[in-house]
Each structure stands twice: as structure tokens, then as C-alpha cells.
Image (cartoon, rainbow, N blue to C red):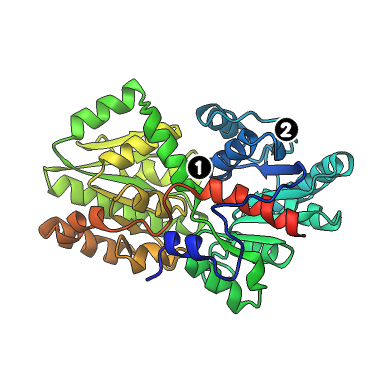
Amino acid sequence: MQTVNDAAKSNKHNINVESSTKAVSRLKIAVLFGTRPEIIKLAPVVRELKRNVDRFEVTAISSGQHADLIKPFAKLFDVEINRDLRVMTANQSTNAVCAKVLMAFDEFLEHQKPDFVIVQGDTTTALSGAIAAFNRKIKVAHIEAGLRSGNANSPFPEEMNRRLISQITTLHLAATSQNRENLLRECVDANRIFVTGNPVVDALKFVLQKNEKSVTIRAIINETQRLKTILLTTHRRESFGSQMRENLIVLRDFVNKNDDTALIFPVHPNPNVREVVGQVFANDERIYLIEPVDYADFIALMNAAWLIISDSGGVQEEAPSLGKPLLILRENTERPEAINSNIARLAENSDKLETALNENYANEKWINSVREIENPFGDGRAAHRIAEILATFYARS
């Protein structure tokens, strides 16, 4: 299997992303984000671009889609937010958020006229920003381009968001060679696709170097260090209701049955999650139901886990980057690289989750093998590659 390293180094159909020396005028770039996953993956890119002040003039813009979460992450990653669109109010529909981001960002574009707009992933903010830029005839660079689940309604609306963004993107910055192949199958011009690795690996390395843990998380890690600790996250709308309840019951019963195990569960604030959690758990021993944690604490919990179980897209990249085995609580995934490399496995329903837990508890061969597998999502140099691609592509255009 071709690794991100191999693809990024060769780029035979593209420019040399490691050694661009051609002089270019200062490139004006607007980087738009609005959610926690976006700022995690865009922070390394913003830092790299701002570090190259002779080549880039960068404006970091928050839509405010996840207003309460953005500022702590900006502080953690040492990223200054230059503009806040403040679009969020209570109980807005997805269409309302999309319209407000589009209008507010369009006003910024009208006055600032950047050369490039960078968006990441598949959020409402990313789609709105890409449309606004396209309508202003401004080039769009899409980080994490080419993810596909194969089902337009799963995840919803993210799968369709990223497909739509691909239709109006100038530079497709794919994390893996598999993502590149997905785009080629959709007849995207090969000369506009670049394999960079995923900047989440850059972000993880940055956080690990800081080595910051809260007192609470440090204490939980110390209490559970001799146990087989499972870290759980679940919050996707596809998981709500009976499916989530059944999965939580399986996990509760597994920990109650095995005295050398523990469960750490940062509970998402969504009422659909909290209601089910309240129905399933009741002061169970070795089960830690905690409030959502900041990113540094979450990485520390992942790093200390025996096994990670999640329906999160980001965790599917973070777990392999830390060499941790992962069970994915979904029927399919747009990140097959983790499964193909045998770092992650699907647990589509509660029966399969129960089977996977029991089998891996009885035989830890897979659990122990994961740490030796090369990370399919890159080497932590994605931000550097992205900066070089932007500069060189602009010089050639």
C-alpha cells in the first residue's frame, strides 16, 4: 500500500512540494473555520503560513459555528483569530447557518479580496465558505479533500457537503492516496490534486510536545493505569436512540463483568446523548462519566487507553497517529485507510461490539500489534507541504 510519505514525495503528476524555490509575490489567503475539528486541522496550516511572512498574508476567520469551543483551541494551538463572523444563535437550522455564513463571509471577501480561501473538511462553514469564494471567482483550497463514505446520506449532511465542495475547488489537498483515487474517479483534474498527509498529525505532535494535562485527567489516568482502559466517544446523530443505548449497555456490562477494565466516557452535551447516558449508567464502578475535555486532555486520555471506541471521524485519524486500536461505531467509514492498515475495525451494531470486546479481551494480539503499524495519515509535515503547494501553484497560475 502506498503511504502518504510515498505519495507526497513523488507527486509525479504534480509540483515538487518539498522544495519550491521559485519567487512569488506575497499571497493573500483567508482561512475559514467554525468547528472544533476544523481549527484542530487548520491551526498547523495557519501557523505555517503566518511563519512565512515574506510569502503569505494570512487572515484566520472564525464563523462562530462552534463559538464556545473555538477560542480555547486557538489558545492551545497559538493561533490568533483575526475575524469572527459571529453567525450562531440558539436553535438555528443547518440552512440558516449556511445562509448566514455565506452572507457574512461574502462581505469579508468583497472588501479583502484574497487570492485563496482555505476550507477544511465537510462542515456547513466549509461549504458556505467555498460557495462564497467561488461566486467571487476566488480560488478555493480544500484540505482533507476526497473523503467518501459511498452513501450520500451517511454521514449527513457531511458526505454531501464534501462532494459539493469538490465541485468548486481549485486545489484538492488530499490526506491520503486513497482520497486522491476517490477524486480521480470523479474526474477531478489530476494536476489539481496533491497528497499532503493530514494536518491532524501535525496538531497531535504539537500538543504532545506541550504535554499539558489538567489535574482531573492526570488523576483519572493514574487511577486507571493498571487497568485495561477503554476510551469512548459517541455523539453522531446516526447513533442517537436505541443504537446508542444498546452500545452503552454492552460497554457497561463488559466493564462490570471484568474487574481489570475501566471505561472513560467524556459525555457530549447534546441532550440526545445525555438522556441515554442517564438511563444506562448509575454509579458503576470503574466507569468515569466526565464532562467534555479540552484537546490536550483528550489526547492524553487516548494515549493512555488500552482500546478506543468512537463514532467520530477525527478519532479515526487520531487513534492511528497515536498507535492505538480503534473500534468504529458506524456501519461505514470515509476513512478506510485505518481499517485497511488493520488499526481500526468496524463495530456496526451492539452485537458486533460485544463480540469484538470479548474476543480482544481474551486475545490481545490485535491490540498489541497496532503500535507497530505505520500511520496511514502522514508524518506530521502536512502543513509544510500545503504551504509549498499554495505558493508554487499560485506562481504557476
Dividing the picture into quadrants, the one containing residue 212 is top left
Observer able to see residue 95: no
Give the x, y percent position of residue 31. Answer: 68, 43
Circle 1 SS class: helix
Residue type at the position of mark 1: Pro
Give the x, y percent position of residue 293. Answer: 42, 33
Q: Nearer the viewer, residue 56 or 277?
A: 56
Which residue lies at the image location 71% right of the left edge and 61% below the top edge? 169
Task: Identify the residue under disc 2.
Answer: 84
Task: Identify the residue under disc 1.
Answer: 271
Mark nearest the camera among 2 and 1 is 2
Circle 2 SS class: strand
Which residue lies at the image location 57% right of the left edge and 31% below the top edge? 74
Q: Nearer the viewer, residue 24 or 272?
A: 24
Dividing the picture into quadrants, the one containing residue 164 is bottom right
Left or right: where 226 falls relative to 20: left
Tell me if mark 1 has few (under 14), some (14-19) or many (20+) residues whose alpha carbon lies within 10 angstroms of its own: few
Marks 2/1: CA distance?
27 Å
Which residue lies at the image location 67% right of the left edge and 60% below the top edge? 171
